[in-house]
Amino acid sequence: MRLYKRMTIISALIALVSFLISILLHYFFICDNEIDFWINLCLGLFSGAILTVFTSIISYYHERRTTLEKFVYHTRSLLSYLNKYHEDMSIEDKINFYLGYCDLDKSDWDMDIGNMDFFFEKVTGNFKYIYNEIYKPILDFNKAVANYKGDFHTYLNTTIKNDVRIIIEKYLSELQGYLLKKTEKDITTEYDDNGNIENVYKYTYEIPKLVFDIKTQLSGHYYEIMYGKNIKRDK
C-alpha cells in the first residue's frame, strides 16, 4: 500500500516534468534533429510514466483493500481472545489469561497498520481515525498487560502469595477496567391500576467494553473506508 502510493506519486511527477520539458523544447527552441530527439525522449518518458501511474493506482487499491481486510482479521483474532475474559475467573486464571494474551503473535497486526498509507490523508483523516479509534486502544491495553507480565510470573512461581496478593489484585483490577464496563438498566417490576410504574429494579451487568467499542468501529466507519459508503448502505 505504501509502496504503490509512492510509485504513483513518483511516476506522476516524472510524467508531468517530462511533458513540460517536451512542450518547452517544442515551442521555445528551434526545431532540428537534435531537439526532436530530446522531445521524442521526453514524450517516451511521459508515456511510460503514465502507464506506470495507472498500473500503480490499480495495484494500490488492490493492496489497500487487502491490507484493510487483513487488519480486520487480525484485530478480530485479538478481540476473540479478549472476549473470553469474565470477572468471575480466579486470580490465577486471570493471570494466565493475560500471560496467554502476551504470548499471542501480534506482529502481523502491527505490520498491517504500518503498511497503511492513504492518499489525501490530510483531507480524509482515514489513518488518523484507524490509529486513534481502533489501533491505539488495543495498543494501550497491550502495553498495560506487558508492564505487569513480570509481576504475574513472580506471583505464580512464589510460594508465599499473601504478601503480593493485594498488589496483584490491584493490577488485575486496572486491566479489567480496559475490558469490562458496568452498566445499569432499570427494569419495571410493578405497575399500579392506572398503568403507572410503582417499583423499579436496577439491574447491573457488565459489557466487554474494549471488544464492544472496537467491533463497533470495525462495522461502522472503518467498513466504509474499506469498501465504500455505498456498499455499506447496501448491506
Image: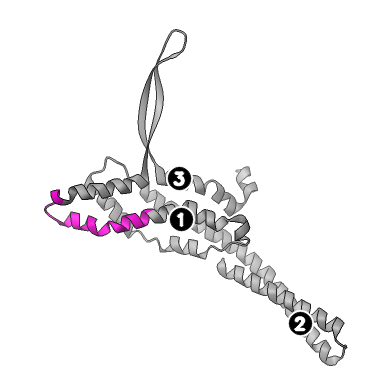
Residue receiving disc 3: 213
Q: Which mark is residue 125?
A: none
Residue that appears at 60% across and 62% down: 62
Q: Nearer the viewer, residue 141 or 211?
A: 141
Q: Residue furthest left?
A: 160
Q: Secondary structure at mark 1?
A: helix
**Type of amino acid under label 2:** Cys
Question: Total number of numbered labels?
Answer: 3
Q: Which mark is residue 135?
A: 1
Q: Which residues are magenta?
A: 141-163
Drawn side of residue 141 relative to residue 164, left or right: right
Drawn side of residue 141 relative to residue 99, left or right: right
Q: Is residue 18 above or below residue 142?
A: below
Mark 3 to mark 2 CA distance (whole Å): 54 Å
Q: Which mark is residue 42?
A: 2
**Type of amino acid under label 3:** Asp
Residue 75 at x, y percent in the picture: 44, 54
